[in-house]
């Protein structure tokens, strides 16, 4: 179906002059509104005012200009229906074949910390979404464009065929409805900030867990399969935004990332981001098999690897500094699936170039987002605030006869950071900015202690003089006893068990220092 008339009304005018000029060169009549019409005329594009089309002027501060039967009749006119053709002729409605519309920047307005209720409400677009929906509904006859990135492809198609294919119009309609759905969701979310008191509207902060959560996602990457080969999977990101975090990382080399790769990489990056000094986390099946922070990156890697070199084989590695040549040299000796870092020196990239299957991901610099933590259950979704608590020494309470030494305190704070990222029940033995034994995901805490001891023995690491971090309280003294027998000299745990007295007494028996954090870090 030939494009003879286009209605253009855009807030974001990126590329619109060139697009309109191309349409005009194809003998498409341009109908436009307000600022868009003014811009096009100044650029030498012939434009017909929408007021001329409707016979009515813009009114109410421009809020009403396209909400008219001659606009929506022209858009919703189904060319294949005889009754529609008769009514269009009777009421002198001119068909509109292409609708080019983008919406008021509601989200940008809402993000302004000084926005007023009136400004927020005024930036709710009505006419734009109405035209977009009308055009998308009638995609069998009308094309609808909501994204300036589509202008070039549309011009190319029109130049070749003089019309848009039905498949193109359907694709544009899908995109248009996704845009208006997201737009309505943004509005519904932000209106929860408004309250009414004594007949006056005021605006406040959005609740951490509002009554409604509107999520709009778009597929960024399809995957061969999910956790297992019989499961389909894909990566989705928030629609209409620049992908951030791990989802926005740039892959520099290697084969396609798998579902499990991304899950493990996310866990690795979350852990290594906790470290202030050069740090490395080695993750296998969503648990750290080794982590360290040292004065140099290569030392951090070697210390992390030393904790459990057997499990590190085939794992993923996160590094919180640009990867240098010395660290790359050591890393190249181990088979790993993926490495994520904030950058890679050229010498490091050269070192890995021959490892074609090794995935290298570069985290993009940018502000870290506060994202809600969501977990699917049958019939619903659990939502919680992310666990971003960063413990300080001042928050700790010494409960034993002996307080930790300065060296032990550094070890306890380091172990606590790692323990937060280990599946519960979690136990971490640490020393000098290095994990030396990790017990993860056991049904009893004492078993996690025993596994951590076994892991250390397998790696031929002594636990003498190490410290112990526990993600939750010890319900019984047996876990502390096992840790003391293994050589642990200090313990950090939340406290709060009915058995705290016995647990503390056991620590004193082994001359262990114990501090309570008052914070639990369960990770299920």
Image (spheres, rainbow, N blue to C red):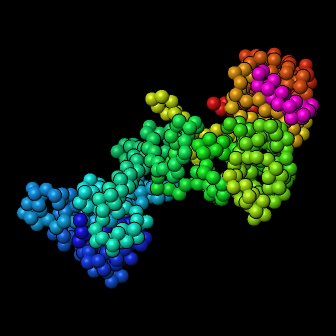
Image position, residue 257 (x, y; %): 61, 49
Image position, residue 136 (x, y; %): 29, 55
Residue drawn at (52%, 45%) of the image: 234
**Image quarter in which the C terminus is found:** top right
Query: Please, is residue 106 above or below residue 201 in the view?
Result: below
Residue drawn at (29%, 59%) of the image: 166
**In the picture, residue 311 is in which quadrant?**
top right
319 or 60: which is nearer to us? 319
Query: Please, is residue 520 above or below residue 272 in the view?
Result: above
Q: Could you tell whether 191 is left or right of 418 in the image?
A: left
329 or 184: which is nearer to us? 329
**Image quarter in which the N terminus is found:** bottom left
Query: Please, is residue 200 above or below residue 154 in the view?
Result: above
Magenta residue span: 446-470
**In the picture, residue 142 is in which quadrant?**
bottom left
Q: Could you tell whether 282 is left or right of 203 in the image?
A: right
Image position, residue 243 (x, y; %): 55, 55
Q: Could you tell whether 286 is left or right of 49 in the image?
A: right
Image position, residue 95 (x, y; %): 19, 65
Residue drawn at (37%, 49%) of the image: 181
Query: Please, is residue 231 above or below residue 502 in the view?
Result: below
């Amino acid at each position: 179906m030939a494009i003879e008339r286009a209605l253009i009304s855009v807030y974001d005018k990126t590329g619109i002059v060139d697009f309109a000029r191309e349409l005009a060169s194809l003998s498409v009549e341009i109908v436009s509104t307000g600022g868009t019409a003014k811009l096009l005329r100044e650029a030498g594009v012939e434009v017909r005012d929408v007021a001329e089309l409707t016979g009515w002027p813009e009114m109410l501060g421009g809020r009403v200009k396209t909400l008219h039967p001659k606009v929506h009749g022209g858009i919703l006119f189904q060319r294949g229906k005889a009754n529609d053709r008769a009514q269009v002729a009777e009421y002198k409605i001119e068909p509109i074949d292409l609708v080019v519309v983008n919406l008021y920047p509601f989200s940008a307005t809402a993000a302004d910390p000084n926005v007023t209720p009136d400004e927020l409400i005024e930036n709710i677009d009505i006419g734009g979404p109405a035209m977009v929906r009308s055009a998308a509904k009638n995609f069998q006859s009308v094309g609808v464009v909501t994204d300036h990135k589509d202008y070039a492809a549309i011009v190319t198609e029109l130049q070749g065929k003089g019309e848009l294919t039905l498949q193109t119009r359907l694709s544009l309609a899908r995109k248009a409805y996704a845009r208006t759905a997201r737009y309505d969701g943004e509005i519904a979310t932000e209106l929860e900030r408004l309250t009414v008191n004594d007949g006056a509207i005021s605006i406040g902060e959005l609740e951490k867990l509002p009554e409604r959560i509107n999520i709009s996602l778009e597929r960024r990457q399809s995957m061969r399969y999910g956790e297992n080969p019989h499961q389909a999977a894909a990566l989705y990101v928030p629609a209409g935004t620049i992908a951030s975090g791990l989802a926005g990382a740039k892959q520099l080399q290697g084969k396609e990332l798998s579902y499990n790769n991304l899950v493990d990489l996310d866990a690795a990056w979350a852990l290594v981001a906790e470290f202030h000094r050069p740090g490395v986390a080695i993750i296998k099946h969503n648990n750290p098999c080794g982590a360290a922070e040292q004065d140099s990156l290569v030392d951090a890697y070697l210390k992390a690897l030393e904790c459990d070199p057997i499990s590190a084989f085939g794992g993923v590695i996160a590094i919180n500094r640009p990867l240098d040549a010395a660290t790359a040299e050591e890393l190249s000796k181990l088979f790993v699936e993926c490495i994520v870092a904030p950058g890679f020196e050229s010498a490091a990239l050269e070192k890995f170039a021959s490892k074609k299957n090794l995935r290298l991901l570069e985290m993009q610099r940018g502000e870290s987002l506060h994202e809600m933590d969501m977990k699917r259950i049958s019939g619903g979704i659990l939502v919680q605030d992310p666990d971003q608590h960063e413990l300080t020494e001042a928050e700790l309470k010494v409960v034993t006869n002996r307080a930790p030494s300065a060296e032990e305190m550094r070890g306890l704070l380091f172990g606590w950071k790692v323990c937060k990222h280990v599946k519960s029940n979690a136990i971490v033995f640490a020393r000098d900015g290095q994990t030396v034994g990790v017990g993860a995901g056991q049904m009893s805490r004492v078993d996690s202690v025993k596994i951590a001891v076994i892991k250390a023995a397998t790696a031929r690491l002594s636990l003498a003089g190490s410290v112990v971090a526990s993600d939750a309280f010890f319900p019984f003294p047996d876990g502390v006893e096992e840790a003391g027998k293994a050589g642990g000299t200090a313990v950090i745990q939340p406290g709060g068990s009915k058995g705290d007295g016995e647990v503390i007494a056991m620590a004193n028996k082994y001359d262990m220092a114990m501090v309570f954090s008052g914070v639990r870090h369960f990770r299920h």
